[in-house]
Image (cartoon, helix red, strand yellow):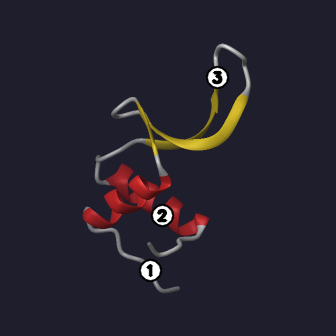
Amino acid sequence: MKEYTDKQINSMILHLKLKNIAEIQYLEQQDLRTLAKFDKSFYDFKTSSWISREMVISSAIETGWEEKNE
């Protein structure tokens, strides 16, 4: 899979929000038993689920996101 920059990922997240497909934010996960913090991950408030970076990318591309050449 092609590597995408953080700027491109942010563009994909905005695309999904504007298309009313997902409401994604970058959040820190925490184990409630030990209160240990994990790496930050993507959370979709529309589906109330954690999603991977690859899922953000594939959803954006499948719904018409295109890379802007600036």
In this rendering, position of residue 12 left or right of residue 22: right
Q: How crowded is mark 2: few (under 14 residues within 10 Å), some or many (20 or more)?
A: some
The tag earlier along the polypeptide, 2 or 3, is 2
Disc 2 marks which residue?
A: 11
CB atoms of marks 2 and 1 within 8 Å = yes
In this rendering, position of residue 7 left or right of residue 53: right
Residue furthest out toward the left: 63
Q: Give me the residue at 60% from left, 64% from top.
A: 6
Q: How crowded is mark 1: few (under 14 residues within 10 Å), some or many (20 or more)?
A: few
| Residue type at numbered disc 3 | Asp
Name the one closer to the observer, 4 or 19.
4
Disc 1 marks which residue?
A: 68
Placement of 46 over or under 68, stated as above or below: above
Q: Give me the residue at 57% from left, 43% from top.
A: 41
Placement of 7 over or under 37, stated as above or below: below
- Badge 2 marks a residue whose secondary structure is helix
| Residue type at numbered disc 2 | Ser
| Residue type at numbered disc 1 | Lys
Nearer the viewer's eye, disc 2 or disc 3?
Answer: 3
Disc 3 marks which residue?
A: 31
The tag earlier along the polypeptide, 1 or 3, is 3
* Residue 49 image offset from top left, x and y in percent: 41, 33
